[in-house]
Amino acid sequence: MSGAVRIAWRHLEPSEPVEALVRKKAARLQRLHERMTSCAVTLELAQRRQKQGKHFRVRIEIGVPGGKRLVVGRDPRESRVHEDLVAAVHAAFSEVRRQLEDRVRRLDHRVKTRLPPPRARVARVFPEEGYGFLRTPEGREIYFHERSVVGGGFDRLEVGVSVRYAEEMGREGPQASSVVPLRAARRAAGATRAAAETAHP
């Protein structure tokens, strides 16, 4: 986080134990989302009638890359109030943590869907045993089984052929769960385009 946690007190005397709790909670959030740019926390004594006792409200505003903000307790009319300030702090940080986790999941999913499948070349093939190895551009070798070759093209694979693949962790290390020879992929894409053009002349 580029700046320190900002803490504001409204209609409340500052409390060192509560401030320490807020900073501890903020540090945990930072570990969850290392690219947080700011964290502002406002602790407020809600304006209620004397007979109803004290009620507390906590507003948290988190800055994230892209100028975005996550806010808990944005609207005082809708935000929850608590009779205990510590309980209010815990509840507000639980809610903003949930929002951060949702954001991280969405970003991870967006990155995964945008990344094209990795490519490699066939390094070794053992036709009689029914398996082989791919070599990635980084020089890693990844095991694959004949059943992993999409379309049943294992018998036609040759050393040096370019493929797309999906990687997973097997019992003995990384392995390709699917292998698609790029020539086959191009043929399939061409067939799809031809069918679309025929359907929509």
Image (cartoon, grey):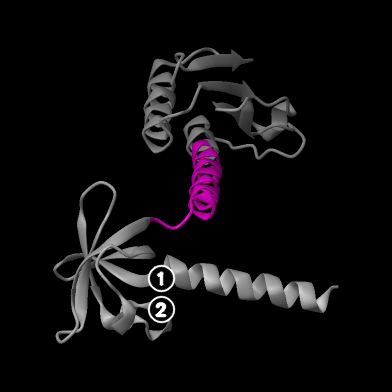
| Label 2 crowd (10 A; few <14 / some 14-19 / many >=20) | some
**Circle 1 residue:** 180
Secondary structure of the residue carrying tag 2 is: helix
Q: Residue at x 63, y 15 (%)?
A: 10
Say whether residue 129 is magenta.
no
The quarter of the image holding the N terminus is top left
Q: Position of residue 103 (x, y in %)?
A: 55, 44
Q: What SS does tag 1 mark?
A: strand
Classify 10 Å Cα crowding around label 1: few (below 14), some (14-19), many (20 and above).
many
Q: Is residue 92 visible?
A: yes
Q: Quadrant of residue 164?
A: bottom left
Q: From the viewer's perspective, tell me whether residue 110 is left or right of residue 137.
A: right
Rounded to the nearest angstrom, the CA distance separating label 1 from label 2 is 6 Å
State the predominant SS element of the stretch in magenta. helix
| Residue 155, image quadrant | bottom left
Residue 125 is drawn in which quadrant?
bottom left
Residue 40, above or below 87: above
Could you say which is closer to the camera, residue 13 or residue 137?
137
Against 58, residue 147 (above or below) is below
Residue 163 marker: none
Looking at the image, which residue is at 37% across and 33% down? Answer: 28
Type of amino acid at the residue the image marks with label 2: Val
Residue that carries the numbered disc 2 in the rendered image: 150
Please report contact status of discs 1 and 2: CB closer than 8 Å, yes or no: yes
Nearest the viewer among 109 and 133 is 133
Q: Position of residue 20 (x, y in %)?
A: 38, 21
Q: Which residues are magenta?
A: 93-118
Q: In the rendered view of the protein, which quadrant contains the C terminus?
A: bottom right
- When the figure is inspected, residue 9 is found, relative to residue 195, above or below; the finding is above
Mark found first going from the N terminus, 1 or 2: 2
